[in-house]
Image: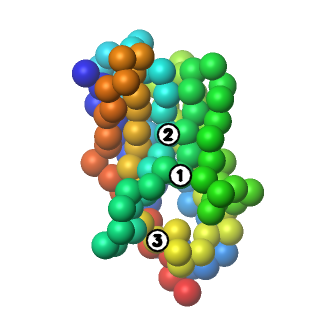
Amino acid sequence: QVQLVESGGGLVQTGGSLRLSCTASGDTYTINAMGWYRQPLGKQREMVATATNDGTIDVADSVKGRFTISRDDAENMVYLQMNSLKPEDTAVYYCYARNYWFSDYWGQGTQVTVSS
């Protein structure tokens, strides 16, 4: 099992920046990928950015050029640097991890609100 805990959400004005952090614990040696998803109110959860152990990074078109994902594998952490935030980025952001057997793990979520 893998446990994920996020931090760093909050309220920010349009054009501002936030940095989300996520710490993994438990069977972290089984993790093959980590990343971030988000779920706006009343909408489906969507991928924001993911990074695999071999360095493959996938970023949603809607945030490309504004958001950057990074990992610190020594500390079992993943980060999401969010710049030039827009009101449509408002959502609950979830940390995500997948192990080598394709089991998915989720954090509890952190709210990001961008005011116009």
User: Badges 2 and 3: C-beta atoms under 8 Å apart?
Assistant: no
Instruction: Tell me where residue 83 sits by quadrant.
Output: bottom right
Residue 70, x across and y down, in percent: 62, 37
Please give left or right for residue 2 compared with residue 68 in the image: left
72 shown above or below 70: above
Residue 88, x across and y down, in percent: 52, 75
Residue 13, x across and y down, in percent: 57, 79
110 shown above or below 11: above
Amino acid carrying mark 1 in the image: Val
In the picture, the disc for residue 35 is: 2
Amino acid carrying mark 3 in the image: Thr
| Pointer 3 local density, CA inside 10 Å: few below 14, some 14–19, many at least 20 | many
Instruction: Tell me where residue 24 sits by quadrant.
Output: top left
Report, in whole angstroms, how far the alpha carbon at label 1 lies from the one at label 3.
12 Å
Instruction: Tell me where residue 29 sits by quadrant.
Output: top left
Q: Badge 3 is on which residue?
A: 90
User: Badges 1 and 2: C-beta atoms under 8 Å apart?
Assistant: yes
Element class at badge 3: loop
Q: Earlier in the sequence, mark 2 or mark 3?
A: 2
**Residue sitting at 32 percent across and 26 percent down?**
103
In the picture, the disc for residue 48 is: 1
Q: In this view of the protein, can residue 7 be seen by the observer?
A: no
**Residue sitting at 32 percent across and 43 percent down?**
107
Element class at badge 1: strand
Residue 15, x across and y down, in percent: 66, 75
45 shown above or below 78: below
Q: Earlier in the sequence, mark 1 or mark 3?
A: 1
Amino acid carrying mark 2 in the image: Gly
